[in-house]
Amino acid sequence: MTLKNPEYDFKWCPGCGDFGVRRGIEGALQQHVTEKEQPISNTVVVAGIGCSGNMVHMLEKEQPFGIHGIHGRSLPLAFGIKMANPELNVLTVAGDGDFLGIGMEHIGPQAQRNLNITAVVMDNGVYGLTKGQSSPTSELGAITTSTPYGKIEGKLNPLRTYLSFGVSFIASIMSSKVKDLSALVYDAMNHPGFAIVHVQSPCTEYNNTYEALKGNPSKGIAPLAYDIPEGHDPTDILAAQELLNSDGIPLGLIYKDDTRETFDERSHKTIGVKEMKSIDALVDGFSI
Amino acid sequence: MKKQDFVVRFAGEGGQGVVTSAEGLAQAMAQSGYYVQTFSTFPSQIRGGPTWTQTRISTSTVLSSGDDLDVLVAFNEEAYNTHKDDVGDDGVIVYNSGDFSVENSEKALGMDFAELAKQTGNNRAANFVVMGALAELVDLPIDILEEFNRAKYTRGRPSDQQIIDSNNMALGLGSVEAKTSGFNLGELADAIKPEGDQILVNGNQAISLGAVAAGLEVFIGYPISPATPILLWMEANLVGEGKFVYQSSSEIESITSLVGAGYAGRKAMTSTAGPGFSLMGEGIGLAWMAEIPCVVVNVQRGGPSTGLPTKTEQSDLLTALYPGHGDLKIPVIAPGTVEECFYAGLMAVNWAERYQGPVVLLSEMALSERNQNIPKPDLSKNLGETRQIYQGNNGYLRYDGFELSPMPIPGQSGSYVANGSEHDAMGDTTHLPSRHIQMTERRFSKLNLLNDGSFEEQNSSSNIAVVPWGGSKGPALDAYNQLISEGMDLGWYYTMYIHPMPEEMLNALRKKDLVIVPELNYMGQYASVLRSEGINAVAITQYTGLPFKVRHLVSEIKNLVSNQIKVGV
């Protein structure tokens, strides 16, 4: 829709990883519509602020509902939407600065609730839209516009963070692997609980990590990213921990626990514990 | 002439029964047809600490908590020393002689609360000892209290009768103590029963009931004094299919998830106080920008930062109007009485639904904990309003034009992007000047839909008017009535609809030579708002953490009026 909208005045840079993420999400949504026989209007895309948040305006074809809110608060917005109508398929899109910097405080509560939503995190290790400041996932020592003498804060490991918070579905992927990304987002949407698909989505302008992720044999650079070995059991939390304790960035499904109740299931159970009284009865309760 | 009015303050340590005594007395007296009001102030700690509650009982509607005490009930020596000077000339101090002794006081009536309670076989009957003494001091028939005791403790438990008997005995013992002391305040006139059914509620409860009467569906809040009771009430009562109430992880989460719920079609509310309200500013701005209905209750406490968590003040008015950055001015409803709290809760939800945006309900600590009998609201009509919902085809331009348009609901037709960035008609981000002009004017034009606020007007021909706001209404009206009865030429205007304010009231005030605004803050916030509307407003300020005394307002108003008249001549 937006491509045909002459007023919309935002563009991703050429080569931006977010293009691949968009194609992946579009594929997952389409699959959701056909296989789940759900109209696209049952999906709400909740966007953070930053380059990645513009995803909500750039999706093509039939449009889901969307909300482009405030920096760092995609998860609370999604929480309110999901609890207002648990039938909705709620998907958040945010970057590493939004999700892991200003918005970090909201990951833990959703994990404990096991809120049945999907979060797609586009990690480029930099604040792109504000032109190249360091982010929680920038490397220690990184020279950025806000760390001219090198970043003096360590690099966050998002995947370990998710696992320790108790997120019940954790996947990792690269933006260039569109098909795999699409499949993981689709699986995440079908996961009963809080699912995060963490995507390495490089910023060609300020933090081009394509080479580091994929490696370059001619320069003797070993790839940082690798496919999770076939034998990995994602339901085994110890195996997931082991995977995340080793070097490199594993790609694929890292952890999944679909035995936990979701937040809306738990919430639904409390319905009927007490019946809602009529307003007349509630007022009469204060009769003198 | 019989006494028309009886003011008792119970003071002591938290946990000594201060609040239960005061509220018990209020409940008993309300049951027998008197008008009652309680006012409490607590320390910000869980156990102990100095606490006091004041109960005012009257044969007509109670507007303020009472300047002078007829009786101080001092549970300990600290309470005695702190409060003894607030007792009126003919007043009595009932003190706990088992705890401390008082010498050289002509007002002091000592009795050993615990020892007398012990004699009944029920150590917890001390409250009833005190109530028995109070009844005797104003020649109140003891059966009023016996009936209250019977009703309260008939709970279908085996111990009921024993407790009722011991409490009745305690009433008798207290009564005898007072009688033999020789103290007497004069007979309290018989109750003149209010017409129609009454309920006894506090401000927080009344707000909750009003919001539910409007059809509230979602409530998300975070604990903070003095707003927490609203969250707790909602958790217990707003239940069942289609309802969701939750204690969030922060005020930031409260407001943003509230915006999410409002966007998804629900009538949604949160409650907070100063510090939490500050955190909510950005989220309220999002609701304004993206045109999403939601209600934020701010129960004001005192001071900036953590300030005075358990005291009262009216210092959040400006931040309520302008909680966020950029061009915005949020609708604000500030109830002035417990009864108005109900209608403020109702109208805040209705306004939010009607204009599709955030509404702030500005209450205050003094109202939140004030128990008062009020006329039972008429619930025979459907009081709640619901937003216009879009039901057409897809391809809808949700933000088209300069006025309100129907709102699509996720899961139904008309998908769009609700956007906190400036946007075009379909909700996509844009920075075009023409769009920013259109959307800014559109957002402000919707305020015209909220022009149904009512206001009070008395003696409109006077060139000088008293115009309080919020909880200062009660003491201001007491002062106004007194000045009028003394023959002063003075007008009265009042509305709980702070923004948008009723246009007719604004126009009337613009014609006055002087508008006097009693308000509990340093800056004179409402007066400055009125001045920005072209009104010659002067504030009477107070920032003690406590409500106005009527006597103080009477003298301040007299000063301002006489200065004005001098200037005028």
Image: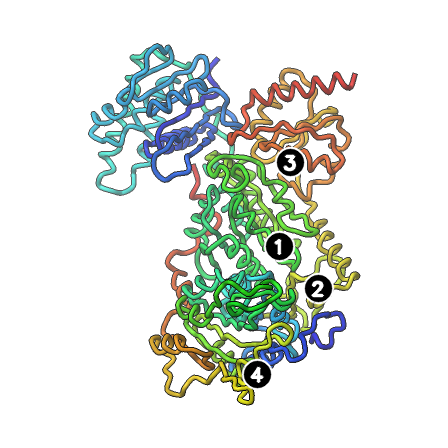
Q: Do residues under tags 3 and 1 come within 8 Å of each other at their CB atoms?
A: no
Task: Judge from the rendering whether residue A180 lies leftward or rightward of residue A5; answer left or right.
Answer: left
Task: Judge from the rendering whether residue B463 lies leftward or rightward of residue B6; answer left or right.
Answer: right
Q: In front: mark 2 or mark 1?
A: 2
Report the residue marked by disc 1: B353
Q: Residue at x 61, y 28 (%)?
A: B541
Query: Mark 1 Cα within 10 Å, few/some/many (few <14, many 20+)?
Result: many
Of the residues under marks 2 and 3, which one precedes in the sequence? Answer: 2
Chain on which label 2 sits = B
Q: How far across and how far down the image is residue B139, in percent?
A: 38, 17
Of the residues under marks 2 and 1, which one precedes in the sequence? Answer: 1
Report the residue marked by disc 4: A176
Tag 2's secondary structure? loop
Label 4 to label 3: alpha-carbon separation: 57 Å
Query: Mark 2 Cα within 10 Å, few/some/many (few <14, many 20+)?
Result: many
Report the residue marked by disc 3: B525
Q: In front: mark 4 or mark 1?
A: 4
